Amino acid sequence: MQDVQGRFILFREERVDVDGTQKNASNEICAWINPPLYLVNDQNMPFDTSNGVVLRRGSSQPFLLKLTIQNRGAFSVRGSIDGVDSNVLQFVVQ
């Protein structure tokens, strides 16, 4: 669900996986040179670190950003693959 500001509503202890697999208009996975870089609140969070609101879990799949929701607050997520930035996803934890 989304709130009136368009942020996705989350709750403590939920797990969220953001799939950044890039696909073309034919729904085929695109070629890439470097794995994606994910930014949470415009910060690169290494695996197994927390910003107080979310914990970034490890992942063997480079296109999956795995998060565990820890506390109330708001945060944003965006990715970048080979210099191309994704849309920004906004979240709020209730």
Image (tube, grey):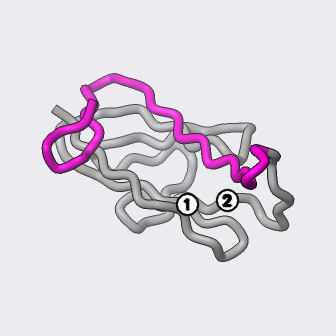
The x and y percentages for residue 30 are 81, 56
Identify the residue at image location x=63%, y=41%: 64
The x and y percentages for residue 94 are 16, 32
Drawn side of residue 77 relative to residue 17, left or right: left
Identify the residue at image location x=75%, y=54%: 24
Q: Main secondary structure of the magenta part?
A: loop
Identify the residue at image location x=56%, y=69%: 85
42 and 24: which is toward the camera: 24
Check disc 2: other Cα within 10 Å, few if <14, some if 14-19, many if 20+. many
Drawn side of residue 46 relative to residue 54, left or right: right
Q: Which mark is residue 36?
A: 2
Drawn side of residue 18 relative to residue 20, left or right: left
Residue type at mark 1? Gly
Q: Which mark is residue 71?
A: none
Spatial CA distance of label 1 from label 2 is 6 Å
What residue would you read off at disc 1?
A: 79
The x and y percentages for residue 26 are 78, 48
Are circles 1 and 2 on residues that touch, CB within 8 Å? Answer: yes
Residue type at mark 2? Pro
Q: Secondary structure at mark 1?
A: strand
The x and y percentages for residue 3 are 17, 39
The span shown in magenta is: 1-27
Quarter of the image for the N terminus: give it: top left
Identify the residue at image location x=45%, y=32%: 16
Residue 13 highlighted magenta (yes or no): yes
Q: Secondary structure at mark 2?
A: loop
Residue 86 highlighted magenta (yes or no): no
Q: Residue furthest bottom?
A: 83
Count of residue discs: 2
Asked if residue 67 is positioned above or below residue 89 in the image, the reply reads: above
Check disc 1: other Cα within 10 Å, few if <14, some if 14-19, many if 20+. many
